[in-house]
Amino acid sequence: MNQVIASFDQENAFLSNFYPSPVVYEGVEYPTVEHAFQAAKTLDNAERVRVRSAATPGLAKRLGRKVALRSDWEQTKIDIMRRLLVEKFKDGPLRTALLATDPAALVEGNRWHDNFWGDCRCQRCSKRNGSNVLGNLLMEIREMLS
C-alpha cells in the first residue's frame, strides 16, 4: 500500500469518530461513534445518558474520562469500537465513502498524543510508531464490506 490517508479531517472527516453519524449501541441511539464509545466505558445508566446528551463529541470524550470505568474495559474496548464502526459503515453513503478509500492505508494521524488508537504526528511523538488501532479497524471493516 503506497497511498496513505494520514488524517481523518477535511474530505476524510467521515472517518473520524466525531463525524455526525448516528449509531445504535445496546438499543440506544447516539449521535456519533465517539458519544457511544465514551458511554460504553461505564455500566452506569445515568452516566451513559449524560455522555449521550453531550452537545458535542469533544464534550462526550471529556465526560467519558470521568465515568466509573467498567471492570472489563481494557479487555472489551477494541471489540466495542469494532462493533460501533461496523454500525456506522454498514450501509449508505458512509459505506460507499469507506469503500472508496481502498487501497489507501488509513492512519488516524493526530497531534493529541494518541498512539494507541492512532499515530501522533507532533514533534514530541515524532517516531511515528503509533499502534493505529482505529485505522486498522477501519481497514478491517473496509475489507469485510468489499
Image (cartoon, rainbow, N blue to C red):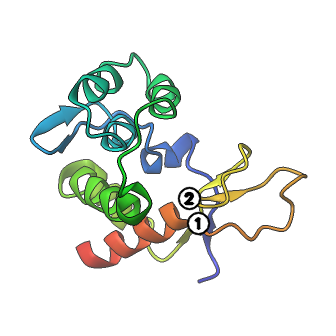
> Can residue 146 be seen in this snapshot?
no
In this view of the protein, which residue sits in the foreground, 142 or 34? 34
Q: Amino acid at mark 2?
A: Trp
- Look at 41% across and 42% down and name the residue there: 69
Within 10 Å of disc 2 (Cα), the crowding (few <14, some 14-19, many 20+) is many
Residue 82 versus residue 40 in the image, above or below: below
Say which mark, if any, is on residue 117.
2
Residue 12 position within the rendered picture, expressed as x and y whole percent measured from the top left: 51, 49
Picture residue at 30% right of the left edge, 51% below the top: 94
List x then y, in percent, for residue 64.
Answer: 45, 33
Q: Is residue 35 left or right of residue 129?
A: left
* Image height of 60 relative to 21, above or below: above
**Image point (14%, 35%), residue name:** 28
Real-space Cα separation, disc 1 to disc 2, in angstroms: 5 Å
Q: Disc 1 marks which residue?
A: 132
> Farthest bottom residue?
1
Secondary structure at numbered mark 1 = loop
Quadrant location of residue 105?
A: bottom right
* Above or below for 88 versus 99: above
Instruction: Quarter of the image for the N terminus: give it.
Output: bottom right
Outermost left residue: 27
Q: Nearer the viewer, residue 45 or 36?
A: 45
| Amino acid at dot 1 | Asn
Q: Nearer the viewer, residue 100 or 25?
A: 25
Q: Is residue 104 above or below residue 72?
A: below
Q: Position of residue 138 (x, y in %)?
A: 41, 65
Residues under numbered marks 1 and 2 in contact, where contact means CB atoms less than 8 Å apart = yes
Q: Which mark is residue 55?
A: none
Q: Quadrant of residue 17?
A: top left
Residue located farthest toward the front when viewing the structure as drawn: 71
